[in-house]
Image: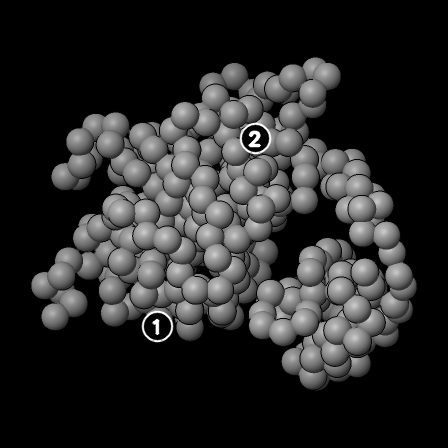
Protein backbone atom coordinates (compact mmCIF):
# COMPACT_ATOMS: atom_id res chain seq x y z
CA UNK A 1 0.00 0.00 0.00
CA UNK A 2 1.18 3.53 -0.84
CA UNK A 3 0.46 6.49 1.43
CA UNK A 4 0.54 9.96 -0.06
CA UNK A 5 0.71 12.95 2.29
CA UNK A 6 -0.15 16.27 0.62
CA UNK A 7 0.14 19.62 2.38
CA UNK A 8 -0.81 23.10 1.25
CA UNK A 9 -1.01 26.43 3.03
CA UNK A 10 -4.40 27.94 2.37
CA UNK A 11 -7.07 30.04 4.09
CA UNK A 12 -9.89 28.09 5.75
CA UNK A 13 -12.26 28.37 2.76
CA UNK A 14 -9.70 26.95 0.34
CA UNK A 15 -8.81 24.26 2.88
CA UNK A 16 -12.43 23.12 3.02
CA UNK A 17 -12.51 23.10 -0.79
CA UNK A 18 -9.36 20.98 -0.88
CA UNK A 19 -10.73 18.48 1.64
CA UNK A 20 -14.07 18.12 -0.09
CA UNK A 21 -12.76 17.92 -3.66
CA UNK A 22 -10.01 15.47 -2.81
CA UNK A 23 -12.29 13.22 -0.82
CA UNK A 24 -14.89 13.14 -3.59
CA UNK A 25 -12.12 12.21 -6.01
CA UNK A 26 -11.03 9.32 -3.82
CA UNK A 27 -14.58 7.93 -3.81
CA UNK A 28 -15.06 8.10 -7.59
CA UNK A 29 -14.35 5.59 -10.30
CA UNK A 30 -10.80 4.59 -11.09
CA UNK A 31 -7.75 3.42 -9.15
CA UNK A 32 -7.78 6.21 -6.61
CA UNK A 33 -7.80 6.54 -2.85
CA UNK A 34 -8.76 3.68 -0.56
CA UNK A 35 -9.16 5.93 2.47
CA UNK A 36 -8.44 9.50 3.42
CA UNK A 37 -7.70 11.65 6.45
CA UNK A 38 -7.68 15.44 6.50
CA UNK A 39 -6.60 18.06 8.99
CA UNK A 40 -7.89 21.58 8.41
CA UNK A 41 -6.32 24.36 10.45
CA UNK A 42 -6.67 28.13 10.30
CA UNK A 43 -3.96 28.57 7.67
CA UNK A 44 -3.52 25.20 6.00
CA UNK A 45 -4.75 21.79 5.04
CA UNK A 46 -3.11 18.37 5.12
CA UNK A 47 -4.59 15.36 3.37
CA UNK A 48 -3.31 11.80 3.78
CA UNK A 49 -4.66 9.27 1.27
CA UNK A 50 -4.02 5.56 0.84
CA UNK A 51 -3.62 3.92 -2.57
CA UNK A 52 -2.97 0.40 -3.78
CA UNK A 53 0.08 1.36 -5.87
CA UNK A 54 2.50 4.21 -6.53
CA UNK A 55 1.03 4.61 -10.01
CA UNK A 56 -2.49 5.17 -8.69
CA UNK A 57 -1.15 7.48 -5.96
CA UNK A 58 0.58 9.71 -8.51
CA UNK A 59 -2.52 9.67 -10.73
CA UNK A 60 -4.63 10.74 -7.76
CA UNK A 61 -2.23 13.58 -6.96
CA UNK A 62 -2.29 14.83 -10.57
CA UNK A 63 -6.07 14.74 -10.63
CA UNK A 64 -6.41 16.55 -7.30
CA UNK A 65 -4.02 19.27 -8.48
CA UNK A 66 -6.03 19.62 -11.70
CA UNK A 67 -9.35 19.82 -9.85
CA UNK A 68 -8.07 22.47 -7.44
CA UNK A 69 -6.00 24.39 -9.98
CA UNK A 70 -2.90 24.33 -7.79
CA UNK A 71 0.08 22.08 -7.21
CA UNK A 72 0.29 20.11 -4.00
CA UNK A 73 3.57 19.36 -2.26
CA UNK A 74 3.45 15.62 -1.58
CA UNK A 75 5.50 12.72 -0.26
CA UNK A 76 4.96 9.02 -0.97
CA UNK A 77 5.89 6.08 1.21
CA UNK A 78 5.20 2.37 1.44
CA UNK A 79 3.38 1.25 4.59
CA UNK A 80 2.16 -1.97 6.14
CA UNK A 81 -1.62 -1.86 5.70
CA UNK A 82 -2.49 -3.62 8.97
CA UNK A 83 -0.06 -1.55 11.05
CA UNK A 84 -1.21 1.66 9.40
CA UNK A 85 -4.87 0.88 10.11
CA UNK A 86 -4.07 0.22 13.77
CA UNK A 87 -2.08 3.47 14.05
CA UNK A 88 -4.88 5.45 12.44
CA UNK A 89 -7.48 3.90 14.72
CA UNK A 90 -5.41 4.69 17.82
CA UNK A 91 -5.09 8.32 16.69
CA UNK A 92 -8.85 8.55 16.29
CA UNK A 93 -9.44 7.07 19.75
CA UNK A 94 -7.07 9.60 21.32
CA UNK A 95 -8.78 12.51 19.57
CA UNK A 96 -12.36 11.34 20.23
CA UNK A 97 -13.76 13.34 23.14
CA UNK A 98 -17.29 13.94 24.38
CA UNK A 99 -19.22 16.36 22.16
CA UNK A 100 -22.25 18.41 23.20
CA UNK A 101 -23.97 18.75 19.83
CA UNK A 102 -26.54 21.07 21.37
CA UNK A 103 -28.14 21.37 24.81
CA UNK A 104 -29.74 18.00 25.50
CA UNK A 105 -27.75 15.98 22.96
CA UNK A 106 -24.34 14.56 23.84
CA UNK A 107 -22.02 12.15 22.00
CA UNK A 108 -19.59 10.28 24.26
CA UNK A 109 -16.83 7.72 23.67
CA UNK A 110 -17.50 4.24 24.95
CA UNK A 111 -14.69 2.69 26.97
CA UNK A 112 -14.73 -1.07 27.43
CA UNK A 113 -13.16 -0.72 30.86
CA UNK A 114 -15.44 1.92 32.32
CA UNK A 115 -18.65 1.63 30.31
CA UNK A 116 -20.74 4.52 29.06
CA UNK A 117 -19.84 7.99 30.30
CA UNK A 118 -23.13 9.69 31.21
CA UNK A 119 -24.06 13.10 29.82
CA UNK A 120 -25.80 15.88 31.74
CA UNK A 121 -29.05 14.95 33.46
CA UNK A 122 -32.02 14.91 31.10
CA UNK A 123 -29.97 14.80 27.92
CA UNK A 124 -29.93 12.26 25.12
CA UNK A 125 -26.59 10.48 25.36
CA UNK A 126 -25.24 8.48 22.42
CA UNK A 127 -22.22 6.29 23.13
CA UNK A 128 -19.91 5.45 20.23
CA UNK A 129 -16.97 3.12 19.99
CA UNK A 130 -14.11 5.17 18.49
CA UNK A 131 -13.17 3.73 15.10
CA UNK A 132 -12.52 4.44 11.44
CA UNK A 133 -16.16 4.84 10.39
CA UNK A 134 -17.23 8.46 9.85
CA UNK A 135 -19.59 10.12 12.30
CA UNK A 136 -18.27 10.95 15.77
CA UNK A 137 -20.44 14.03 16.26
CA UNK A 138 -17.71 16.65 15.91
CA UNK A 139 -17.88 17.41 12.17
CA UNK A 140 -20.28 20.25 11.24
CA UNK A 141 -22.29 18.07 8.82
CA UNK A 142 -22.86 15.43 11.50
CA UNK A 143 -23.86 18.12 13.99
CA UNK A 144 -26.31 19.66 11.53
CA UNK A 145 -27.97 16.28 10.91
CA UNK A 146 -28.08 15.36 14.61
CA UNK A 147 -29.63 18.69 15.61
CA UNK A 148 -32.23 18.39 12.84
CA UNK A 149 -33.17 14.85 13.95
CA UNK A 150 -33.41 15.94 17.59
CA UNK A 151 -35.84 18.72 16.63
CA UNK A 152 -37.80 16.91 13.93
CA UNK A 153 -38.31 13.35 15.12
CA UNK A 154 -40.49 14.05 18.19
CA UNK A 155 -42.85 16.17 16.04
CA UNK A 156 -42.88 13.55 13.27
CA UNK A 157 -43.66 10.79 15.76
CA UNK A 158 -46.40 12.73 17.53
CA UNK A 159 -48.43 14.27 14.75
CA UNK A 160 -49.59 14.24 11.16
CA UNK A 161 -51.12 11.15 9.60
CA UNK A 162 -48.76 8.72 11.30
CA UNK A 163 -49.71 6.49 14.16
CA UNK A 164 -47.83 7.20 17.37
CA UNK A 165 -44.63 5.22 17.54
CA UNK A 166 -44.67 4.16 13.87
CA UNK A 167 -42.06 6.48 12.36
CA UNK A 168 -39.47 4.71 10.21
CA UNK A 169 -36.13 6.27 9.29
CA UNK A 170 -33.43 5.38 6.77
CA UNK A 171 -29.85 6.60 7.24
CA UNK A 172 -28.14 6.27 3.86
CA UNK A 173 -24.34 6.13 4.21
CA UNK A 174 -24.49 5.48 7.94
CA UNK A 175 -20.80 5.37 8.88
CA UNK A 176 -20.74 4.88 12.66
CA UNK A 177 -24.55 4.69 12.75
CA UNK A 178 -24.81 7.82 14.90
CA UNK A 179 -27.67 9.37 12.91
CA UNK A 180 -29.82 6.24 12.95
CA UNK A 181 -29.15 5.81 16.68
CA UNK A 182 -30.09 9.44 17.33
CA UNK A 183 -33.34 8.91 15.42
CA UNK A 184 -34.20 5.84 17.50
CA UNK A 185 -33.51 7.71 20.72
CA UNK A 186 -35.73 10.61 19.66
CA UNK A 187 -39.01 9.04 18.63
CA UNK A 188 -38.39 6.72 15.67
CA UNK A 189 -39.85 3.24 16.01
CA UNK A 190 -37.44 1.60 13.58
CA UNK A 191 -34.42 2.59 11.49
CA UNK A 192 -32.51 1.17 8.55
CA UNK A 193 -28.83 2.05 8.11
CA UNK A 194 -26.99 1.42 4.85
CA UNK A 195 -23.33 1.70 3.88
CA UNK A 196 -21.04 0.35 1.15
CA UNK A 197 -18.18 -0.15 3.64
CA UNK A 198 -18.13 -3.44 5.58
CA UNK A 199 -16.31 -1.74 8.48
CA UNK A 200 -19.02 0.92 8.73
CA UNK A 201 -21.74 -1.74 8.70
CA UNK A 202 -20.04 -3.57 11.55
CA UNK A 203 -19.51 -0.35 13.53
CA UNK A 204 -23.17 0.64 13.09
CA UNK A 205 -24.28 -2.70 14.49
CA UNK A 206 -21.89 -2.52 17.44
CA UNK A 207 -22.82 1.06 18.29
CA UNK A 208 -26.52 0.21 18.10
CA UNK A 209 -26.00 -2.56 20.64
CA UNK A 210 -24.04 -0.20 22.90
CA UNK A 211 -27.03 2.13 22.92
CA UNK A 212 -29.65 -0.63 23.45
CA UNK A 213 -31.36 -0.01 20.10
CA UNK A 214 -29.95 -2.99 18.17
CA UNK A 215 -33.31 -4.74 17.96
CA UNK A 216 -34.84 -1.73 16.18
CA UNK A 217 -32.06 -1.15 13.65
CA UNK A 218 -31.49 -3.02 10.38
CA UNK A 219 -28.01 -2.50 8.91
CA UNK A 220 -27.51 -3.24 5.21
CA UNK A 221 -24.33 -3.52 3.15
CA UNK A 222 -25.12 -1.97 -0.24
CA UNK A 223 -23.15 -1.95 -3.51
CA UNK A 224 -20.68 0.91 -3.92
CA UNK A 225 -21.92 1.46 -7.47
CA UNK A 226 -25.59 1.29 -8.35
CA UNK A 227 -28.69 1.35 -6.14
CA UNK A 228 -29.01 -0.90 -3.08
CA UNK A 229 -31.42 -3.82 -2.91
CA UNK A 230 -34.91 -2.31 -2.38
CA UNK A 231 -35.88 -2.52 1.28
CA UNK A 232 -39.50 -3.12 0.20
CA UNK A 233 -40.95 -0.12 1.98
CA UNK A 234 -41.04 3.65 2.05
CA UNK A 235 -39.79 5.72 4.95
CA UNK A 236 -41.05 8.69 6.91
CA UNK A 237 -37.58 10.23 7.16
CA UNK A 238 -34.46 9.84 5.03
CA UNK A 239 -31.15 11.32 6.17
CA UNK A 240 -27.94 11.13 4.12
CA UNK A 241 -24.68 12.73 5.22
CA UNK A 242 -22.50 11.75 2.27
CA UNK A 243 -21.00 13.87 -0.56
CA UNK A 244 -22.27 16.13 -3.32
CA UNK A 245 -21.95 13.77 -6.28
CA UNK A 246 -23.67 10.78 -4.60
CA UNK A 247 -26.49 13.08 -3.44
CA UNK A 248 -27.08 14.17 -7.02
CA UNK A 249 -26.72 10.67 -8.46
CA UNK A 250 -29.11 9.13 -5.93
CA UNK A 251 -31.88 11.72 -6.25
CA UNK A 252 -34.28 9.29 -7.94
CA UNK A 253 -33.63 6.54 -5.41
CA UNK A 254 -34.06 8.89 -2.45
CA UNK A 255 -37.32 10.24 -3.86
CA UNK A 256 -38.65 6.70 -4.18
CA UNK A 257 -37.69 5.84 -0.60
CA UNK A 258 -39.55 8.75 1.06
CA UNK A 259 -43.35 8.50 1.38
CA UNK A 260 -45.49 11.49 0.30
CA UNK A 261 -45.34 13.96 3.18
CA UNK A 262 -42.17 12.35 4.51
CA UNK A 263 -39.06 14.36 5.28
CA UNK A 264 -35.58 14.51 3.79
CA UNK A 265 -32.27 15.75 5.23
CA UNK A 266 -29.12 15.87 3.07
CA UNK A 267 -25.64 16.96 4.12
CA UNK A 268 -21.94 16.37 3.44
CA UNK A 269 -21.88 19.47 1.22
CA UNK A 270 -20.33 22.92 1.40
CA UNK A 271 -22.47 26.05 1.65
CA UNK A 272 -21.79 26.97 -1.96
CA UNK A 273 -22.92 23.50 -3.14
CA UNK A 274 -26.35 23.72 -1.48
CA UNK A 275 -28.01 25.52 -4.40
CA UNK A 276 -27.22 22.64 -6.76
CA UNK A 277 -28.82 20.18 -4.35
CA UNK A 278 -31.90 22.41 -3.97
CA UNK A 279 -32.34 22.53 -7.72
CA UNK A 280 -31.86 18.76 -8.12
CA UNK A 281 -34.49 17.87 -5.49
CA UNK A 282 -37.06 20.62 -6.15
CA UNK A 283 -39.03 18.43 -8.56
CA UNK A 284 -39.96 15.86 -5.90
CA UNK A 285 -39.66 17.85 -2.65
CA UNK A 286 -41.18 21.07 -1.36
CA UNK A 287 -40.52 23.33 1.65
CA UNK A 288 -36.80 23.07 0.89
CA UNK A 289 -34.56 24.87 3.37
CA UNK A 290 -30.83 25.27 3.94
CA UNK A 291 -29.10 25.38 7.33
CA UNK A 292 -25.39 26.12 7.63
CA UNK A 293 -22.59 25.65 10.14
CA UNK A 294 -18.92 26.59 9.72
CA UNK A 295 -19.12 26.64 5.93
CA UNK A 296 -21.06 23.35 5.60
CA UNK A 297 -24.74 22.95 4.72
CA UNK A 298 -27.83 20.84 5.42
CA UNK A 299 -30.71 20.73 2.91
CA UNK A 300 -34.12 19.62 4.21
CA UNK A 301 -37.47 19.18 2.49
CA UNK A 302 -40.86 17.44 2.40
CA UNK A 303 -41.82 14.82 -0.21
CA UNK A 304 -44.51 16.03 -2.59
CA UNK A 305 -47.67 14.04 -3.17
CA UNK A 306 -48.00 12.33 -6.55
CA UNK A 307 -50.52 14.95 -7.73
CA UNK A 308 -48.02 17.75 -7.02
CA UNK A 309 -45.44 16.07 -9.26
CA UNK A 310 -47.83 15.85 -12.20
**Which of the two discs, 1 and 2, labels the residue nearer the N terminus?**
2
In this view of the protein, can residue 43 be seen by the observer? no
**Dot 1 and dot 2 residues touching (CB under 8 Å):** no
* x and y percentages locating residue 41 in the rendered image: 76, 57
Residue, x 41% and y 25% (percent of image)? Answer: 215
Residue denoted by label 1: 279
| In-front residue for pair 140/84 | 84
| In-front residue for pair 31/19 | 31
Looking at the picture, the colour scheme in use is one colour
Residue, x 33% and y 61% (percent of image)? Answer: 253
Q: Residues within 10 Å of mark 1 (few under 14, many from 20)?
A: few
In this view of the protein, can residue 175 be seen by the observer? yes
Query: How far apart are the alpha carbons under marks 1 and 2?
Result: 37 Å
On the rendered structure, is 126 left or right of 13? left
Q: Residue 200 carries which label?
A: none
* x and y percentages locating residue 177 in the rendered image: 51, 39
The secondary element bearing badge 1 is classed as: helix
Residue denoted by label 2: 206
* x and y percentages locating residue 296 in the rendered image: 54, 59
Tell me the quarter of the image containing the N terminus: bottom right
Quarter of the image where one finds residue 48: bottom right
Quarter of the image where one finds residue 270: bottom right
Amino acid sequence: MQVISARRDAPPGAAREAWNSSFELSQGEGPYGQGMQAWIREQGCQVIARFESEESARAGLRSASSVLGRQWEASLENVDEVAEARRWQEEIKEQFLSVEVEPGLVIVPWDGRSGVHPGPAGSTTIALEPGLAFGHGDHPTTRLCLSWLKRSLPAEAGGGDREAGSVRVIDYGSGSGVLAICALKNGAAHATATDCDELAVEMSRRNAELNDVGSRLDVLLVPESGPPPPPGESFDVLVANILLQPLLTLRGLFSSLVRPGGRLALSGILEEQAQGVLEAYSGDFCSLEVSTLDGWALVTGVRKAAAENA
